[in-house]
Image (cartoon, rainbow, N blue to C red):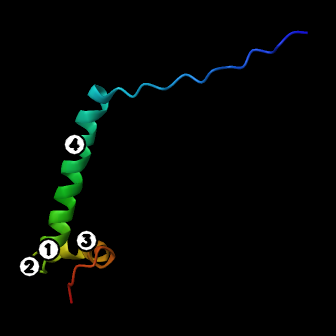
Amino acid sequence: MTTAAVPVPVPIRIPIRQILPWAVFTAIVALMMLYFVGSAQGADSVIHEFVHDGRHLLGFPCH
């Protein structure tokens, strides 16, 4: 009687040194977007209209 070999799962290595710069870049861009959405109070009507729906989505008052 023979036994069947059971495959052993190999863990995936995540290259942190390659992902970290992109994660930092993404975080900075996200914070900049949050700043512009939060700071546009109507003085710049173009920026205000561009981020108007985002302000409602994030809960910023604008009316």
Q: Earlier in the sequence, mark 1 or mark 3?
A: 1
Tag 3 residue: 51
Q: Residue at x 21, y 84 (%)?
A: 61
Please tell me in which quadrant of the rendered image residue 38 appears: bottom left
Q: Quadrant of the C terminus?
A: bottom left
What kind of element bears circle 3?
helix
Q: Quadrant of the N terminus?
A: top right
Q: Amino acid at mark 4?
A: Phe
Tell me the crowding category of disc 3: few under 14, some 14 to 19, or many 20 or more residues within 10 angstroms, Cα based. Answer: some
Task: Return the residue found at the far front.
Answer: 1
Q: Amino acid at mark 3?
A: Val
Tag 1 residue: 40
What kind of element bears circle 2?
loop
Q: Earlier in the sequence, mark 3 or mark 4?
A: 4
Q: Nearer the viewer, residue 41 or 8?
A: 8
Q: Amino acid at mark 1?
A: Ala
Q: Nearer the viewer, mark 1 or mark 4?
A: 4
Q: Residue at x 20, y 69 (%)?
A: 37
Q: Residue at x 72, y 19 (%)?
A: 6
Tell me the crowding category of disc 1: few under 14, some 14 to 19, or many 20 or more residues within 10 angstroms, Cα based. Answer: some
Residue 23 x/y as whole percent:
27, 41
What kind of element bears circle 4?
helix
Callout 2 touching callout 1 (CB < 8 Å): yes
Tag 2 residue: 43
Tag 4 residue: 25
Q: Earlier in the sequence, mark 2 or mark 3?
A: 2
